[in-house]
Amino acid sequence: MNKEAAVFSYTDLREWLKLVDSIGELKRIVSADCNLEMGTVAELIYRERPGVIPALLFDKIQGYPDGWRVLFGQQLSMRRLALILGLPLDAGPLTQVDLFRRKLSTLQPIPPRIVDHGTVLENRISGNDIDLLKFPVPLIHEQDGGRFIGTASIAITRDRDDGWVNLGTYRSMVHDSKRLGLFTSSVSKHGRIHMEKHFRAGEPCPVVVCVGQDPLLVIGGGHPIEAGYSEYDYCGGLKGKPIDVVRGELTGLPIPASAEIAIEGFMHPGDVQAEGPFGEWMGYYGDETVDTPVMRVERIYHRDDPILCCARPGRPPSDESLAKCFVRAAQIWNRVEKTGLPSVKGVWSIESGCGSLFNVISIKQAYPGHSRQALVLAAQVLGGAYNGRFVVAVDDDIDPTNTFDVLWAMATRCDPESSIEIIRRCWGGALDVMIPAEEKGHSSRALIDACKPYHRRSDFPPVAESSEKLKNTIREKWKEDIFG
């Protein structure tokens, strides 16, 4: 594989896994138990294994047929993200973000292509044969309210009025062999909007939950894009070719033709059941139990020897924490520049901020108030507006992906009394553990100006650091003794 070239050389999850294996980032784990063991193995590897965190493919799972597998950790390395997004494998994080946001700025949506046949249709299950627990659905965290089949999944719905299709990453808990709880955490979620439109009309809402598919679809479904614009079109535009889909036999919804497992059914008005709790993306358990719409399963489609894709949300690093950082940073950078703000040098979302709570924007200051303008824009454009907490502006000598240097800039270039602003009643989410239940939906933002004061730029004390010219000379002279 050409490690410098952009790569979109896979057509489905299995081909992508072969690429992951070829770059040494796939770890196979044999004979694990899906009752807590897989989730805890993932947690230990994510938090305690040195070096690059691999993707984890569990095989020969206790109590299930040989060949039926479970995959964790799809998105937890920069190189795997590059494979998913068609970027060069070995560029630095900020370069990767820059390349991706340039893709976003020129993206032309490509609608999906309907095909007659797909590998997802190799097996069809209906009627009394439906059993969600025939799959190795894990109990992930010790205090979870049940087994969650939908954690790295996409829920496919269609707008009743306008016909556009949404893919959303909503958790799905198994109630019993034929029923799922589908948790859409906010009234602003597009899948929730679709569901409510059907319910107001007194109709069941058709839905398909896929729990194994092209990993690009999970990234598409897991990050905000505009309403009315399908994630299928978005992902097709990123790939430069349409996503192949087949029609669901009962709902007519478009299902990825190469999906591993697709679950088709309906949610009915007033049909709810307590769901949860579940360890969530902020690193805490979500609401204890919530009455959640029930999806009644009427068809299951799956490939031979299916791969169930899972995520272990929780205290970061977690399955989606790095991808959230990457995609949100690219979205913020792209949208801030489109407002006309000049001299943006980079954007990053710090991973310990769970992919949205701690965003950093680097600028080359051009005029008084430039840094405050950057802060306000980064806090409110797509990618930064939802579920934020802190936004930090730094000068262009600070790499926003280097948390140590960002904290150094905050510690030395920020006077709390004059450098921090609070904006209130911003767009928050239902899983924000700091917001009381009665106030869910709003949260505040701290805007932290860690740039040198504009009026003192010329006389601000110089950084105690060797020049690049001197450092390069010394690197070359001593490369064998120091860097060899």
Image (cartoon, helix red, strand yellow):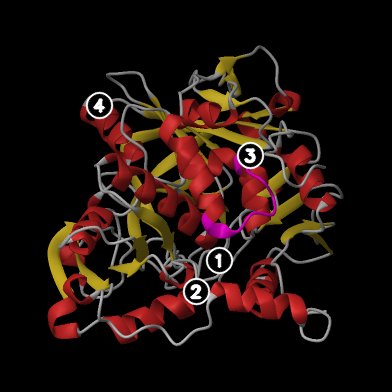
In the rendered structure, the answer to whether residue 399 lies left or right of residue 10 reads left
Quadrant hosting residue 247: top right
Q: Is residue 474 left or right of residue 2?
A: left
For this view, does 408 lie left or right of residue 67? Answer: left
| Kind of element beneath mark 2 | loop
Q: Residues within 10 Å of mark 3 (few under 14, many from 20)?
A: some
Badge 2: residue crowd in 10 Å (few <14, some 14–19, many ≥20)? some
Give the mark nearest the N terminus, 3 or 2.
Answer: 3
Considering only order in the chain, which callout, 2 or 4, is on the residue closer to the N terminus?
4
**Image quadrant in which the N terminus is located:** top right
The residue at which mark 2 appears reads as: 315
First in sequence, mark 1 or 3: give its number: 3
Q: Which residues are magenta?
A: 85-94
Q: Amino acid at mark 3?
A: Gly
Instruction: Say which mark, if any, is on residue 307.
Output: none
Return the residue at label 1.
318
Task: Locate residue 200, reporting x and y percent.
Answer: 21, 30
Disc 3 marks which residue?
86
> Percent x, y for residue 164?
37, 22
Nearest the eye: 212 or 392: 392
Disc 4 and disc 2 in contact, CB within 8 angstroms: no
Label 2 sits on what residue type? Arg
Q: Which residue is mark 4?
A: 202
Q: Secondary structure at mark 1?
A: loop
Gap between marks 1 and 3 measured at Cα: 22 Å
